[in-house]
Amino acid sequence: MNAWGLGPGIYPKTQAPQPQAQPHCLCDLSPIIDLIRPNPKFNPNAERAFLESLPAKEARAVAGSFAKLERAKAGESLEAIYNEGKDELYRWKRVGEMMETPQIKAARLSTNAIDAALVEEEKLTIPTRLRPVSQAFNFPDEPEYQPIRRALEAIDAAHDDGQLPTIDVQLVREMEDAAEYAVDNRGKPSIAVAARHPAREFSLVHENGHFLDHQAFSPGVFESDQQKSAMARILEAIRQSKAYQEWETIPLDDARDYLLDPTEMWARAYATWVTRRSGSQRLAAQLAVIDQDELGYWQDADFATIEFEISRLFAARGWL
């Protein structure tokens, strides 16, 4: 979008959008040192013109939904639409706003400050577990791993598990994704979590969904990918949801493949289920931000059947 007459995606320094502290955001800012235009002028019609230039489905993806797209086309700014109902830490801001009060605004870039702002240290009710999931996890006993402990507390509050192998968890300073589940050539599973990511807890819960999928049913095989899967009723409930119908409308690309991949559908559903069942306010706050900015999740009523089927499966396996 060419909002200032400088070229698509180019802004005066103080007007550039500040990348949000949100899960999966890979946006970055780069200076352009060979651009000379002392008086750029803002075009209030640029957003509408940009949206109208896109195919309908792409415009919907930019706006967030068809309803939000209509609001933008009616003259409401994308900034106002994106910021609606969001916590102050996750609102779309500009670099100039960050520069005005750096001692306060810089908190958006500190995952520790985000942790503190989201919710005070919470005490979850954890039933007595015969085989708590947390026992399978190995990680350093260091303060920076507190988000991992929080995530595991929420998982333990939500459910027990079958017999899981041990799994190493590592915080990684530089990685593109929020987190990643992997298995080495010896079959040893591990999870890496981006150390500076603002939703480390929710990301760990998501990856634990992959861990359970790969190790708790038929070890070494992703249960969600099997033709006669124990998750069949869960996956069918997902496919019957309104959210799934919306994902199907996305043009064929990597994003659509991700949304419709059974292993990813299961992991997103599992993370949502743990968030709701554990009662973790921290996870709920992180999920709310993700749900505002990304496809892939469900409204409460749309998730009800999925939630029931996950609970039914876990109860049948003795995990509740």
Image (cartoon, rainbow, N blue to C red):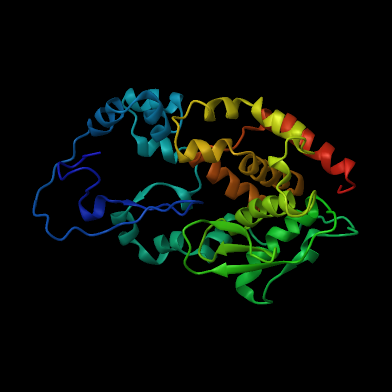
Q: Residue at x 40, y 67 (%)?
A: 103
Position of residue 12 in the picture relative to residue 20 (left or right): left
Q: Residue at x 77, y 35 (%)?
A: 228
Q: Residue at x 34, y 25 (%)?
A: 55
- Percent across and percent down for residue 293 are 48, 41
- Percent across and percent down for residue 91 are 43, 47
**Whether residue 204 is visible:** yes
- Percent across and percent down for residue 50 are 27, 31
Q: Nearer the viewer, residue 303 or 225?
A: 225
Q: Residue at x 80, y 48 (%)?
A: 217
Q: Quarter holding the N terminus? A: top left
- Percent across and percent down for residue 51 are 31, 29
Residue 304, compared with residue 205, is above or below; it is above
**Whether residue 280 is visible:** no
Farthest residue in the front direction? 185
Position of residue 66 in the picture relative to residue 168 (left or right): left
Q: How many marks?
A: 0
Position of residue 11 in the picture relative to residue 130 (left or right): left
Residue 266, compared with residue 164, is above or below; it is above
